[in-house]
């Protein structure tokens, strides 16, 4: 944990023990040691929401993906279902074996030809290495003709980072084919804000309460991301350079909750967002329907 790592930078137990020169000092040491361990546990509890911890059970080692690609494809008419099946059959495990992760994949509700997926990397260096290993590797070589033949555009890609360590994209377990036989459920919402240059920090600070308020309507936040302003180190895959952008991700349990809870609240917030003077245009709301095996979905804690 990030905060726990900060705590570990303080005095070590060995250093404190070297200063204990009497029985009384040792007694004080025991008390201080107990307090230190209690404080460490308290920090972990405060910085790891119990709800998210339960959801992410079994995926603790998959949590650190600060480099995010938000990829929006346009597929050929009538081919979106086929594209999704090919994608889910061949690609999620291929990327995971290389060290990246398909965090979620979706079809867009308002865009009949839209397929969106979110991919995470541990670092920019790994992004270059993993993309090279995949796109010059055997899985893509075998299936690229089929997949490329089903797409008309794959260049609408935002390169993003979490706004803070606690705003990372929620990593959920893979869909269980036994207990989730119907596949991924719920709806994911992406709010895309075109922020004025130099105003990302001001924007996220100003609207922090607004994003938090979504939770009171039953919406689960799944990430708050901003443009990662670094050179594209795998230019074979273009990324957009018309930023900066901020992307808020949330999950609702079903279409009814989307219509009755989230969308009215988002509409209510629209005036404050546009009147802030921090945006270059009206925010875009993208409603994403998880495909059968999407990790990012509505999932109840076990």
Image (cartoon, rainbow, N blue to C red):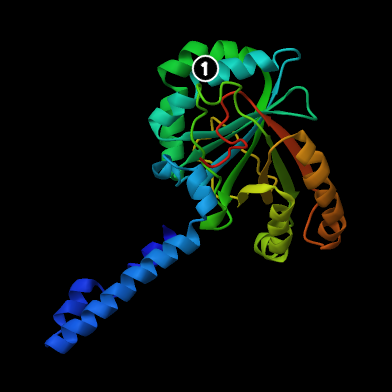
Q: Which residue is mark 1?
A: 89
Between 13 and 35, the one nearer to me in the picture: 35
Residue occupying the point 78% across, 46% down: 262
266, above or below 133, in the image:
below
Between 52 and 137, the one nearer to me in the picture: 52
Residue occupying the point 77% across, 40% down: 258
Q: Counting other residues with Cα less than 10 Å from the Cα at mark 1, is it few (<14), some (14-19), or many (20 or more)?
A: few
Residue occupying the point 63% across, 16% down: 83
Q: Secondary structure at mark 1?
A: helix
How many numbered discs sit on the rendered protein? 1
Between 177 and 187, the one nearer to me in the picture: 177
Q: Position of residue 259 (x, y in %)?
A: 82, 40
Q: Position of residue 154 (x, y in %)?
A: 65, 27
Residue occupying the point 45% across, 42% down: 57
Left or right for 246, reference 24: right
Between 263 and 139, the one nearer to me in the picture: 263
Q: Position of residue 43 (x, y in %)?
A: 43, 66
Image quadrant for the N terminus?
Answer: bottom left
Q: Position of residue 37 (x, y in %)?
A: 32, 69
Q: Is residue 55 visible?
A: yes
208, above or below 221, in the image:
below
Q: Is residue 197 visible?
A: no
Residue 191 lies in quadrant: top right
């Amino acid at each position: 944990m990030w905060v726990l790592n900060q705590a570990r930078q303080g005095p070590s137990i060995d250093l404190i023990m070297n200063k204990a020169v009497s029985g009384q000092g040792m007694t004080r040491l025991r008390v201080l040691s107990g307090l230190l361990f209690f404080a460490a546990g308290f920090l972990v509890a405060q910085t790891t929401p119990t709800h998210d911890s339960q959801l992410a059970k079994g995926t603790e080692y998959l949590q650190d993906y600060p480099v995010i690609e938000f990829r929006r494809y346009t597929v050929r008419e009538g081919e979106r279902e086929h594209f999704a099946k090919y994608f889910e059959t061949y690609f999620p495990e291929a990327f995971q074996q290389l060290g990246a992760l398909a965090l979620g994949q979706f079809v867009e509700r308002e865009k009949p030809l839209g397929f969106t997926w979110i991919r995470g990397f541990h670092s920019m260096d790994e992004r270059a290495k993993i993309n090279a290993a995949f796109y010059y590797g055997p899985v893509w070589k075998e299936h690229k003709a089929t997949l490329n033949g089903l797409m008309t555009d794959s260049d609408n890609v935002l390169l993003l980072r979490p706004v803070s360590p606690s705003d990372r994209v929620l990593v959920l377990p893979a869909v269980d084919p036994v207990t989730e036989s119907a596949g991924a459920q719920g709806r994911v919402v992406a709010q895309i804000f075109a922020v004025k240059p130099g105003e990302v920090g001001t924007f996220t600070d100003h609207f922090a309460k607004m994003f938090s308020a979504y939770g009171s309507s039953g919406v689960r936040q799944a990430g708050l991301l901003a443009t990662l302003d670094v050179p594209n180190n795998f230019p074979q895959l273009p990324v957009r350079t018309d930023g900066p952008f901020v992307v808020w991700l949330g999950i609702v349990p079903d279409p009814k909750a989307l219509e009755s809870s989230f969308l009215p609240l988002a509409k209510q917030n629209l005036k404050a967002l546009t009147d802030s003077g921090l945006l270059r245009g009206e925010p875009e709301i993208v409603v994403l329907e998880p495909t059968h095996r999407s990790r990012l979905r509505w999932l109840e804690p076990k």
